[in-house]
Amino acid sequence: MAETFANATQVLEAFRGIKKVTIEEYFSSGHRTCQGCESALIMKLMVKAAGPRTIVLGSTGCMYVANTTYYTTPWVVPWMHTQLGSSGSAALGTAAGLKSLMRKGKMKAEPINVIAFCGDGGGADMPGSVKRLIHTRWKKNTAGMLAAGHTECRYVANVCGSYAVEMMNKVRRALTIGGPTFIHSLDPCPKGWDYDPMLSHELGELAIETGIFPLYEVEDHVVKYYGKTKAIVEGRARKPVREYLLKQGRFAHFIEEDLAYFQAKVDEMWEKWEIPGVIPFRRLERSKAALDAK
Ligand SMILES: Cc1ncc(C[n+]2csc(CCOP(=O)(O)OP(=O)(O)O)c2C)c(N)n1
Ligand code: SF4
């Protein structure tokens, strides 16, 4: 009789420092991404953290196009393309299929990681080009929405390739806990964002230091801040958002009014949110005051 297999996961211990990171590569040569592409770095680190018993699915976007040039691929583990906007459902189907095969004894029962990857267009928002500010609405807070609204998702995190070991350890934590889990990665893109490729790492750091992209995790609904984000929560001054925006050609047309708008949105996230940088509920004392007023 087949071994019973019910959502078991493996324990992937955190890498204790860069020297402890494994050397095996599962995303290697054979891709056509641009010089300085942080998404390619994330692919490499993500699957390195996950290990060989992993299947990756990716929706339409750069990480599909640039990694699947005819007759070449950097993927050492199985990889599958899925329709724009459907990476989550494709991953769920893949995991269910594996579980079924294991239950029927048609394949060895073991934990296999199923990771779905998508760009922000495929997972959250699709900006236009008509408005000066790119989009008529501020970006959706996808990680925060899942942390606040998904009752079964036990792990949500924000990561950036500029903090590589932390990023890999969050992937390992998510896979150890087992799905559904969600990680949002900020990946600087020299071509789309229009900057010198050598600035990729620095732009990732600036996204954190300006407070635009907070590094945190929510495990079993408990929030933990990381690195410079933690320092900001504890009182460290944020760098002005213009330091991040004006290094990118895509914002070269911004006038002072646009920069002030961005700054005000980020200030609001840190100064008025109940859980700064994570959940956009208003602070409790303000909510209480509103209730008392009724
Ligand atoms: C249903 C559908 N609509 C539109 C497209 C065209 N399309 C291909 S990639 C893409 C953008 C994807 O953006 P994102 O998910 O952010 O990925 P990125 O390339 O930025 O990593 C679009 C609109 C498509 N492939 N399928
Ligand atoms: S366009 Fe951007 S995301 Fe696509 S391969 Fe180039 S750097 Fe990477």
Image: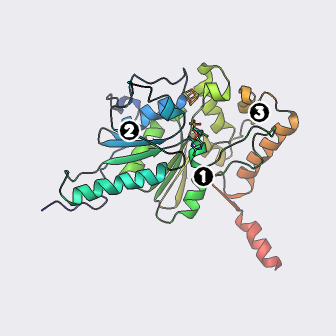
Q: Residue 29 occupies which quadrant of the picture? A: top left
| SS class, disc 1 | helix
Q: Residue at x 33, y 36 (%)?
A: 77
Q: Going by the picture, which residue comes out furthest to the bottom?
A: 294
Callout 2 crowding tier (Cα within 10 Å): few <14, some 14–19, many ≥20? some
Residue matched to label 2: 79
Asked whether the beta carbons under mark 2 and mark 1 sit within 8 Å of each other, the answer is no
What whole-number distance in Å separates the C-alpha atoms at marks 3 and 1? Answer: 23 Å
In this view, the mark in front (2 or 3): 2
Q: Is residue 52 left or right of residue 183?
A: left
Within 8 Å of ligand 1, the CB of disc 1?
Answer: no
The numbered mark at residue 242 is: 3
The quadrant of the image that shows the N terminus is: bottom left
Q: Nearer the viewer, residue 138 or 165?
A: 138
* First of labels 2, 3 by sequence position: 2
Instruction: Residue at 82%, 32% (x, y): give it.
Output: 254
Q: Neighbour class for label 1 at 10 Å: few (<14), some, many (≥20)?
A: some
Q: Which residue is mark 1?
A: 142
**Amino acid type, callout 1:** Thr
Q: Is residue 247 left or right of residue 71?
A: right
Q: Amino acid at mark 2?
A: Trp
Q: Is residue 270 above or below residue 33?
A: below
Q: Is residue 16 visible?
A: no
Q: What is the x, y in percent for residue 106?
A: 19, 53
